Structures are given as C-alpha cells and as structure tokens.
Amino acid sequence: RKEVEQDPGPFNVPEGATVAFNCTYSNSASQSFFWYRQDCRKEPKLLMSVYSSGNEDGRFTAQLNRASQYISLLIRDSKLSDSATYLCVVNRDNTGKLIFGQGTTLQVKP
Amino acid sequence: DTEVTQTPKHLVMGMTNKKSLKCEQHMGHRAMYWYKQKAKKPPELMFVYSYEKLSINESVPSRFSPECPNSSLLNLHLHALQPEDSALYLCASSQPFNGGLASTDTQYFGPGTRLTVL
C-alpha cells in the first residue's frame, strides 16, 4: 500500500462543474499537508497548504481529516485553465522529506 | 514566477560525459532538495541539504554527486549516466523543517532541467 494514495483519474468535467479529489495517507504521525498543481512538462507549484480547520482560496477549498487520515480538495466553477495534475503531498517527519501521491489528472472541457 | 532557478533548461549528454546541473534560490531558505521525475510519475526525492550539509541521500547511485557551495546554490554533478537516468530533474527549497508548520516547510520548486542521456 502506498503511503499517500490518490485516484489517478482522469476526471473529465465540463466548465463550471464542481469537482472533488480525495487523498488518504497511512502514517498517522504525518505533520503537514499540501496540494500541489503540476502542468504538463512543468514543475509542481504549491496550490495550498491544508489545515485541520479547513482553508479556502477563491474557488479552491481544502480539508484535512486527521481521524480518518484523508485530505480533500474541492474546485468550484471549474475553468479550462484548471486542467492539470493535482498532487497530494504529505510531510510526515522532521526531515522535510515530502511524500507525494501519484497525482490526479483533471481535464476541464468546454 | 518561481524564485528558484535552474540551468540548463535542457541537457543532452552521452554516457561518458560529465555535466552539472545548477540551482539557485533567493528566498533565504536553508534547505534545498534534488528530485527526479519520470513521465506520469510523481517527483522522487534524491538528496536533501539542510544548512549546507547533506542530510538525506535516498540511496542514489554515485554517478550523481550533489554539492551545496553556499546557502543559495545547489549543484548536481553527473558522470557516466545511463539512458534510464533520462528524466526531469527538479530542485526545490524551503526553510528547514520546523515541526509541522506548513507555512515554513513548504517546498518551492524550480522549473527543472530536462535531461536526456544517449
């Protein structure tokens, strides 16, 4: 079992749709949590950090459930430009080593 | 725009060549990282430097040799690579890990060097 698991998709949605991604992690001692976005042949870019209280940035909402060990990302009113791979990332110890999920591919269609 | 820069953007080398990848950050970070990423896979950690000292080597073959000359620079020296080493090599930086404070341990990635080994 992978330490961080995501549904690889692809998720094909129309513009304006709401889409949700989930991610589970196996190490209960994990410390911090992130969603990164990666466009084809580009570097990963931080989308948002994820906090237990939940956090929102415009059309994006991230939630962390420590009891169930899962992280979610909700994208509202999808845009064509949201098409990318979304990486769930966990920083699980005090070494700074990031554990990446396999990524979830989102394709937003007109 | 990323504040982590990498050169070159693309590199093609033969199996007998020696080359170096360079990374620079101007965010005052004291931790720097090398990752390797193959197509359709997530990045794989290779090395971590914290306060200019190597803190993690993920059992990387010795044909990859990292160097951290100062707090802003990170190099990856390449020698006698194999075709399977062809990949995107990403550099990242962050503050050294601070007990789970996401605002300080967030890693910022450079644009990468796309390496092809012939």
Image (cartoon, coloured by chain):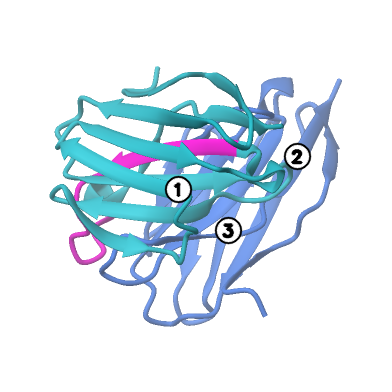
How many discs appear? 3
| Chain A painted colour | blue
Q: CA distance from mark 3 to mark 1?
A: 36 Å
Is the residue under label 2 in contact with that under label 3 (CB below 8 Å)?
A: no
User: Horizontal and vertical percent for residue B22?
Assistant: 36, 27
Which residue is denoted by mark 2 in the rendering?
A: A106
Q: Which mark is residue B117?
A: none
- B5 to the left or right of B97: right
The chain containing the residue under callout 3 comes to: A
Please tell me whether mark 3 or mark 1 is closer to you in this view: 1
**Disc 1 residue type (three-letter):** Phe
**Disc 2 residue type (three-letter):** Leu
Residue A46 visible, this angle: no
Which residue is denoted by mark 1 in the rendering?
A: B64
Q: Secondary structure at mark 3?
A: strand
Which residue is denoted by mark 3 in the rendering?
A: A72
| Chain B painted colour | cyan
Q: Quadrant of the N terminus of chain B?
A: top left
Residue in the image at 26% along x and 28% along y:
B25
Residue in the image at 75% along x and 39% along y:
A106
Is the residue under label 1 in contact with that under label 2 (CB below 8 Å)?
A: no
The chain containing the residue under callout 1 comes to: B
Quadrant of residue A39 within the rendered picture = top right
Q: Residues within 10 Å of mark 3 (few under 14, many from 20)?
A: some
Residue in the image at 64% along x and 30% along y:
B14
Q: Secondary structure at mark 1?
A: strand
Q: CA distance from mark 3 to mark 2?
A: 14 Å
**Disc 3 residue type (three-letter):** Ser
Magenta residues (range): B88-102
Sequence order check, earlier mark of 3 and 2 = 3
For the residue pair A86 and A56, the one nearer the viewer reads as: A86
The chain containing the residue under callout 2 comes to: A
